[in-house]
Each structure stands twice: as structure tokens, then as C-alpha cells.
Image (tube, grey):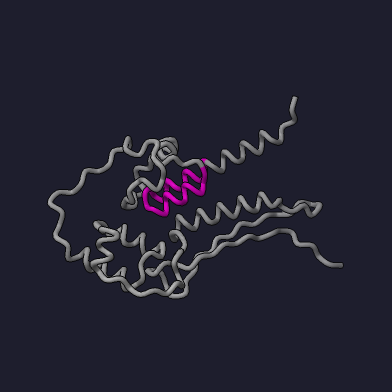
């Protein structure tokens, strides 16, 4: 008699960034237990779980290297400075993680940033009001926040216009929120999903 599988496993993995061990990968897995009658999760449920895993990977190791594996000539420092006008190390790191810079271009910009004269005065910290009703991409890249001082979920939703777990992962990948804040957002969307499922399961009338 052939045994039937009792669960389905869905995994997503992604290579670690340049600062991680060579050949290292991060892998996240979710498991679905099958019903007594062998009922399997629907394609929509699998797709939703996959989106959640991808968002978690964005938060943990950053967005995928979009330009990896596409060979091209390294640009000169003058062209790089004119194109990106780097002022923060975080911007250079993000450009590298998104595949915009080759390893040599990244090193050139890091060296350039280290030899630039210091700014006469530090720019004022942006107030929360500047982010209201602005898309995620328009918000500046910030330094990662410490675990303490986690902002309320409602403030995060309004400030970054977050409407889904995937958007929360994108904001986290830009280091605009701390990992603790991302996890709070994740719990928020999971609770919304559970309440929606409970409401859908109630008989009408």
C-alpha cells in the first residue's frame, strides 16, 4: 500500500550578500499539513505563502541581485559620481545589492566616499510629516533603527503607505524600519488575514 504524504513543504532560498560566507544561502520554509481526506492547499494559499517568504527574505538578506551575471565594463569614478552623487555609504550598499554596481565600481565609490571632505553641517533629520502620502520609493534610505523604540504599527502604515506584507518587506530592505518593526507589521497582516478567513467562514444570514 502506497503511503500518502501528510504535508506539503514550500521553501525559498537566496544567496547571502557579499558580506556573508562564500556560497552561503538563506532558506525559509513553510509547511502545510494535509487534511484527513488528503485535501491540499489551494494555489492561492500557496501563492500567498510564497509572497510572505519572499518578503521575509527581503527583510533578512536584502532584495535579489537584479543585475548579477550580466557582464559589462566598469565605469570610471567620474561617471559613477556624476550618475549617483553618493553621500551615504547606505546608498552605495543598496546600489550594489540591487546589481547596479560591479564589485570594482562599488570599491571605487567606497574609496571616494572615504576621501570626500566632511559635510559642513549634518542635514536635519526628516520629520514624519514629509512621508505622508508619499510612495515608498520616494522616501530616503535611512540607517537601520535600533530594536528599542519600536514605532506603533499604525504610524508605520501611514508613514510609508504600507498596504501589504510585501511592501513591508520592501521598506525593511531599504533599512527604513527595524527588524522588530517589520515583525510587528507581519503580525498585523497575519491577524488581518486570520480575521478575514474567520469572517468568510461564518454562515450568512
Residue at 17 percent of width and 66 percent of height: 115
Residue at the top extreme of this rendering: 205
Q: Position of residue 8 (x, y in %)?
A: 69, 59
Residue at the right extreme of this rendering: 1
Q: Is residue 72 above or below residue 169?
A: below
Quadrant of the rendered image containing residue 134: top left
Q: Is residue 88 magenta?
A: no
Q: Position of residue 165 (x, y in %)?
A: 51, 46
* Extent of the magenta region: 164-188
Task: Give the quarter of the figure containing the N terminus.
Answer: bottom right
Q: Nearer the viewer, residue 113 or 42?
A: 113
Residue at 34 percent of width and 49 percent of height: 145
Residue at 27 percent of width and 66 percent of height: 79
Quadrant of the rendered image containing residue 204: top right
- Total marks placed: 0
Q: Nearer the viewer, residue 149 or 135?
A: 135
Could you tell whether 143 is left or right of 61 in the image? left
Q: Main secondary structure of the magenta part?
A: helix
Residue at 46 percent of width and 64 percent of height: 66
Q: Position of residue 109 (x, y in %)?
A: 26, 66
Quadrant of the rendered image containing residue 202: top right
Task: Give the quarter of the figure containing the C terminus.
Answer: top right
Q: Is residue 31 above or below residue 191?
A: below
Could you tell whether 78 is left or right of 166 in the image? left
Amino acid at each position: 500500500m502506497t503511503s500518502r504524504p501528510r504535508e506539503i513543504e514550500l521553501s525559498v532560498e537566496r544567496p547571502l550578500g557579499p558580506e556573508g560566507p562564500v556560497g552561503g544561502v538563506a532558506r525559509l520554509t513553510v509547511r502545510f499539513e494535509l487534511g484527513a481526506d488528503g485535501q491540499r492547499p489551494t494555489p492561492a494559499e500557496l501563492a500567498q505563502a510564497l509572497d510572505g517568504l519572499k518578503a521575509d527574505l527581503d527583510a533578512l538578506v536584502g532584495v535579489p541581485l537584479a543585475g548579477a551575471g550580466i557582464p559589462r565594463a566598469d565605469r570610471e569614478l567620474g561617471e559613477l559620481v556624476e550618475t549617483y552623487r553618493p553621500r551615504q555609504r547606505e546608498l552605495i550598499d543598496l546600489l550594489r545589492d540591487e546589481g547596479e554596481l560591479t564589485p570594482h565600481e562599488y570599491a571605487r565609490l567606497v574609496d571616494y566616499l572615504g576621501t570626500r571632505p566632511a559635510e559642513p553641517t549634518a542635514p536635519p533629520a526628516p520629520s514624519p510629516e514629509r512621508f505622508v502620502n508619499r510612495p515608498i520609493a520616494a522616501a530616503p534610505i535611512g540607517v537601520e533603527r535600533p530594536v528599542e523604540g519600536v514605532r506603533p504599527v499604525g504610524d508605520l502604515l501611514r508613514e510609508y503607505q504600507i498596504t501589504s506584507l510585501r511592501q513591508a518587506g520592501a521598506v525593511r530592505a531599504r533599512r527604513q524600519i527595524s527588524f522588530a518593526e517589520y515583525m510587528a507589521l507581519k503580525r498585523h497582516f497575519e491577524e488581518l488575514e486570520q480575521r478575514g478567513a474567520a469572517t468568510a467562514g461564518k454562515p450568512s444570514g
